[in-house]
Image (cartoon, rainbow, N blue to C red):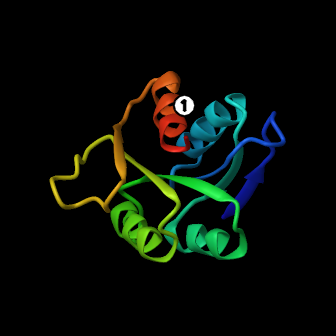
C-alpha cells in the first residue's frame, strides 16, 4: 500500500516512511508532517522501491528492519546501491544491527523513540 501525505511546508524535504504496521507508520508520518516534511509512505519494500523509482525528490528513507519479504536492512542496502544520495535511518524495537550490517552512512534509531529524537535524527541527516 502506497500513500502520500502533504506536509505543512511546501519546500520541506521529502521523506519515505517504510513500515508494515499501519499505526506505527501513521504515527511516524504524523510526527514528520508536523515537523514540516513532505511524507510518502510504504507498507513494504517493493512499494518503497516503486516510490523511489517514480520520484527524484526523496531525500531520506526511514525504515523498520522487520518486514515481511525483504527486510529493512536489505531495502536500505538496495537504496544505497541505487540511490546513494538518499539518507537512510533504520529502526527496530527488537533488533539492533551489528557492525557491518548497515549500509555505509545509514543511522539507527531504536524503538520506541521520542518524536523529537526522530525529527532530530532525520534533520541532521538532511543537512
- Which residue is nearer to you in this view: 83 or 95? 83
**Can the viewer see residue 18 in this picture?**
no
Q: Quadrant of residue 80?
A: bottom left
Residue 110 lies, in percent from the top left, at 33, 37
Instruction: Name, please, the residue furthest toward the left.
Output: 99
Element assignment for label 1: helix
Q: Position of residue 66 (x, y in %)?
A: 36, 57
Quadrant into which the C terminus falls: top right
Residue farthest right in this picture: 10
Tell me the residue at 54%/35% (across/down): 123
Q: Name the foreground residue: 21 vs 104.
A: 104
Decide: is 43 above or below 126. Answer: below
Quarter occupied by the N terminus: bottom right
Residue 43 in percent (x, y) is at: 57, 60
Residue at image location 53% in from the left, 60% down from the top: 86
Classed neighbour count for the residue bearing mark 1: other residues with Cα under 10 Å, few (<14), some (14–19), many (≥20): some
In this rendering, the count of numbered labels is 1
Q: Quadrant of residue 65?
A: bottom left
Residue 15 in view here? yes
- The residue at 60%/54% (across/down) is 59
Looking at the picture, how far across and down is residue 67, in whole percent? Answer: 41, 61
Q: Could you tell whether 111 is left or right of 84 in the image?
A: left
Residue that numbered label 1 is attached to: 119
- Image position of 71 (left or right of 99): right
Amino acid at each position: 500500500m502506497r500513500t502520500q501525505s502533504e506536509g505543512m511546508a511546501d519546500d520541506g524535504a521529502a521523506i519515505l516512511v517504510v513500515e508494515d504496521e499501519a499505526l506505527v507508520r501513521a504515527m511516524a508520518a504524523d510526527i514528520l508532517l508536523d515537523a514540516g516534511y513532505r511524507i510518502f509512505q510504504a507498507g513494504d519494500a517493493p512499494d518503497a522501491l516503486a516510490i523511489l523509482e517514480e520520484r527524484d525528490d526523496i531525500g531520506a528513507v526511514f525504515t523498520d528492519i522487520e518486514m515481511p519479504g525483504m527486510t529493512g536492512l536489505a531495502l536500505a542496502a538496495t537504496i544505497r546501491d541505487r540511490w546513494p544520495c538518499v539518507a537512510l535511518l533504520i529502526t527496530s524495537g527488537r533488533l539492533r544491527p551489528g557492525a557491518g550490517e548497515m549500509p555505509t552512512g545509514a543511522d539507527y534509531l531504536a524503538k520506541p523513540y521520542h518524536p523529537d529524537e526522530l525529527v532530530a535524527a532525520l534533520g541532521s541527516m538532511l543537512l
